[in-house]
Amino acid sequence: MPIDQLEILALSYLWPFLRISALLMVAPIFGAGTVSVRIRVVLAALLSALMAPMLPVNAAIEFFSAPGILMALREIVIGLAMGFVMQMIFGAVVLAGQSIATGMGLGFAMAVDPQNGVQVPIVSQIKVVIATLLFLAIDGHLMLLSAVFQSFALVPLTDPGFAVTGFENVVSLGSQLFASALLLGLPTLTAVLMINVAFGVITRASPQLNIFAVGFPVTIVVGLVFLFLGMPAFIAAMQRFFETGVNQTLMILG
């Protein structure tokens, strides 16, 4: 095989590999700290081998050239942006759990989040675990990989350009998700606030009552009860979030 054809063949696998590997580096599940780099590299190589034969390649672009470097940076940015959109959903879940844990008095109870490798309140950890299981149950990981394949039709490898106007949707999506995250925790936060107000009135009426010995366990119990009662609404909201996130990964590409 001539060297020119061999270079074109190598580039046909390299460009998809850059976009897919960048996505797997930050996407939920795939980008977790418990998933080793070797597994991500092998998975990206396998997916590139499956997708590359179905994708056209611009033979005029050489890798060791200015257009080739810009092309590589573009593919990495696209993959990182698509994975970041889905990662924001789990960040919104962590925020909702932190607000609830603070209201319940469990802000000091921390656990290591395997998704991001940082310490989060135990309530956030519970919500992240449920969201992760739900993400796998609705085949969210397969939907994300399907979105990657569709992204090659929206931003083909034969077109070296890239419109950045779609990144405005990422900012608006982030504000919507974090506002929705606060709404997810609003029922529990309202119940805990009412309990605190009630204990404040009781303390005012009976100062000799040890409010810390009584109020702290009651606040935790009420918070856990409302967390359990709000679980169906939380699961339904997360399904909408995941569907919106997958669609948004394609909207940022136009």
Image (cartoon, rainbow, N blue to C red):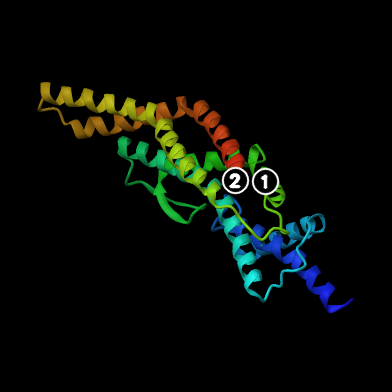
Q: Amino acid at mark 2?
A: Thr
Residues 245 and 101: in front is: 245
Q: Is residue 217 left or right of residue 152?
A: left
Label 2 neighbour load within 10 Å: few <14, some 14-19, many 20+? many
Q: 237 above or below 169? A: above
Quadrant of res 44: bottom right
Which quarter shows the C terminus?
top right
Q: Is residue 192 left or right of residue 205?
A: right
Q: Which residue is mark 2?
A: 249
* Disc number placed over residue 49 in the picture, else none: none
Answer left or right for 250 relative to 118: right
Q: Amino acid at mark 1?
A: Ala
Identity of the residue drawn at 46% across and 24% down:
229
- Residue 153 image offset from top left, x and y in percent: 72, 49
Proximity of marks 1 and 2: CB atoms separated by less than 8 Å: yes
Which percent across, then down, holds residue 113?
47, 51
Q: Which residue is mark 1?
A: 147
**With respect to residue 195, does 95 lie above or below?**
below
Could you tell me which quadrant the N terminus lies in? bottom right
Q: Residue at x 39, y 35 (%)?
A: 182
Q: Which is nearer the eye, 136 or 141? A: 141
Structural crowding at the residue carrying mark 1, measured as other residues with C-alpha within 10 Å and reported as few (<14), some (14–19) or many (≥20): some
Q: For residue 137, which quarter of the picture?
A: top right
Q: Nearer the viewer, residue 215 or 151?
A: 151
Helix, strand or loop at label 2? It is helix
